[in-house]
Amino acid sequence: MPVAAASPASPLMWMAVVLAAATAVAWLLRRPSAQAAWPRIGFGVALLVFGAALALQLAVDLGSGHSSMQLRLHRGISPGTPAGLRTMVVCYLALLAASGWGAWALLRRRR
């Protein structure tokens, strides 16, 4: 079984993907006006669910002492060694900040 399938954050990731895909399909079928709020809300909630999944996965990775992301940082042709836990935490925090900012930008009230 792949590592990602055993992760407790996988169901949340799938929920975020399905919500974003459903919002995109609905947007393509309906072509709402620029003032319509539901596409922003759909994508904003998908980003919030994605951020919750990232936070859960970060907690699991910090609790276990290793990351399930399997990020390899290398230059050139030969594969490098897996990135350390500190690098993974920085990547998680950058993704959390980006998804949080995106959700805030989509879900805030427009005047």
Image (cartoon, rainbow, N blue to C red):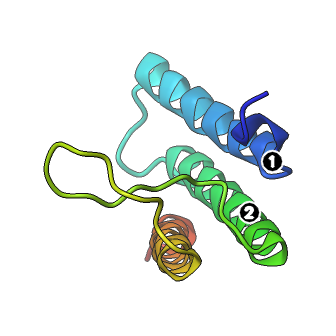
Task: Where is residue 67? Give x, y as percent.
Answer: 65, 63
Nearest the viewer among 3 and 8 is 3
Mark 2 and mark 1 residues within 8 Å of each other at the beta carbon: yes
Residue 12: x and y in percent read 77, 47
Seen from the viewer's position, the closer of residues 64 and 58 is: 64
Q: 57 or 97: which is nearer to us?
A: 57
Q: Residue at x 47, y 29 (%)?
A: 27
Residue 109 in view in this figure: no
Q: Please name the residue that numbered disc 1 is placed on.
A: 7
Badge 2 amino acid: Gln
- Residue occupying image coordinates x 55% and y 49%: 43
Q: How many marks?
A: 2
Q: Residues within 10 Å of mark 2 (few under 14, many from 20)?
A: many
In this view of the protein, which residue sits in the foreground, 35 or 69?
Answer: 69
Vertical comparison of 31 with 79: above or below = above
Query: Looking at the image, is 75 positioned above or below residue 88?
Result: above
Q: Position of residue 6 (x, y in %)?
A: 83, 40
Residue at which label 2 appears: 57
